[in-house]
Image (tube, rainbow, N blue to C red):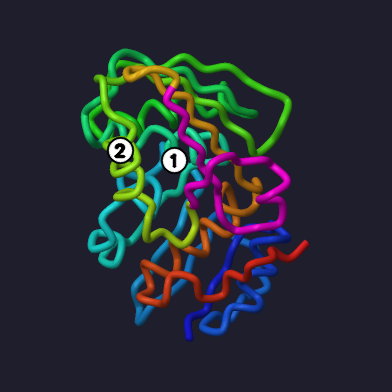
């Protein structure tokens, strides 16, 4: 068991209150933090405040297990990174992709920094939308076959707990759920449209923070994260 403190965020506090390996302390704190055998550790939701950052699905777990601090992206950056991380990591992005999501303008520096961590430094264009938890990405890539693209995303997310590859990704499917749904559509051999949706407190928020805590603390990845989020 570990004693954990966290911000005054209702869904996050509800998840931690029911986590079987956590005792939630009553006093709110700026970040999700805990003491593990005298070792002070944190999960932040500001990727610009921490060098070790990104999606749990993309970051190597070994540094997380050994880290004092880890930062998860905000809601818009999470969705953008789900769409773009497999392409950036493979080095097949050509020119700046476009990202349309609620909050994308505010999170633009974080998206840029997270893509740079994966080796893509050519920037991106950003537009805001009115629908929270929904992101549309258009990317120009080196020409690739549908089978190669499917294999690329399957390698990144095929064994993931909290990113699911689906033919289409309606927002209603992920409301109140801890996972994101990602759809990849090849509009041409060198052009992709990627749709990603997630509940802002699911993969885009509280559930993602608990997922990161589980990996850092050595717990099962899905421990304390129900299929239906508390409201």
Q: Residue 178 colored magenta? A: yes
Check disc 1: other Cα within 10 Å, few if <14, some if 14-19, many if 20+: many
Which element carries disc 2, helix, strand or loop? helix
Q: Position of residue 141 (x, y in %)?
A: 30, 20
Image quarter where the C terminus lies is: bottom right
Badge 2 crowding class, 10 Å Cα cut-off, few under 14, some 14 to 19, many 20 or more, is few
Considering only vertical position in the picture, is 114 above or below 104?
below
Relative horizontal placement of residue 177, taking residue 112 as reference (left or right):
right
Of residues 222 and 167, the one drawn nearer to the viewer in this rendering: 167
Residue 151 vs residue 182, the one in the foreground: 151
Q: Is residue 164 above or below residue 228?
A: above
Residue 106 image position (x, y, % from top left) = 57, 25
Determine whether 98 is above or below 92 in the image: above
| Displayed quadrant of residue 23 | bottom right
User: What's the residue at 24%, 59% (across, down)?
Assistant: 63
Q: Residue at x 57, y 22 (%)?
A: 100
Q: Quick check: 217 left or right of 203?
A: left
Highlighted magenta segment, given as a residue range: 164-186
Q: Name the residue beneath numbered marker 1.
A: 82
**The quadrant where residue 214 appears:** bottom left
Q: Mark 2 points at which residue?
A: 147
Looking at the picture, how far across and down is residue 227, in whole percent? Answer: 63, 67
Label 1 sits on a secondary structure element that is: helix
Question: What residue is shown at x 73% (from left), y 25% (from top)?
Answer: 130
Q: Quadrant of residue 20?
A: bottom right
Q: In this view, does 45 lie to the left or right of 151?
A: right
């Amino acid at each position: 068991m570990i004693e954990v403190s966290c911000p005054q965020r209702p869904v996050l506090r509800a998840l931690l209150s029911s986590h079987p390996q956590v005792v939630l302390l009553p006093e709110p704190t700026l970040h999700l933090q805990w003491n593990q055998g005298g070792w002070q550790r944190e999960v932040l939701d500001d990727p610009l405040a921490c060098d070790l950052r990104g999606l749990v699905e993309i970051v190597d777990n070994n540094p997380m297990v050994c880290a004092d601090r880890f930062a998860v992206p905000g809601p818009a950056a999470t969705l953008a990174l789900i769409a773009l991380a497999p392409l950036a990591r493979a080095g097949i992005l050509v020119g700046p992709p476009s990202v349309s999501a609620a909050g994308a303008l505010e999170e633009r520096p974080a998206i840029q920094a997270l893509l740079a961590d994966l080796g893509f430094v050519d920037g991106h264009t950003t537009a805001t939308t009115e629908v929270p938890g929904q992101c549309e990405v258009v990317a120009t890539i080196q020409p690739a076959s549908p089978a190669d693209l499917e294999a690329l995303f399957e390698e990144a997310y095929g064994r993931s707990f909290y990113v699911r590859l689906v033919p289409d990704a309606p927002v209603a499917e992920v409301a109140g759920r801890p996972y994101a749904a990602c759809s990849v559509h090849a509009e041409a051999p060198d052009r992709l449209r990627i749709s990603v949706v997630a509940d802002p407190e699911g993969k885009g928020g509280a559930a993602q923070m608990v997922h990161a805590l589980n990996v850092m603390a050595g717990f099962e990845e899905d421990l304390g994260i129900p299929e239906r989020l508390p409201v």
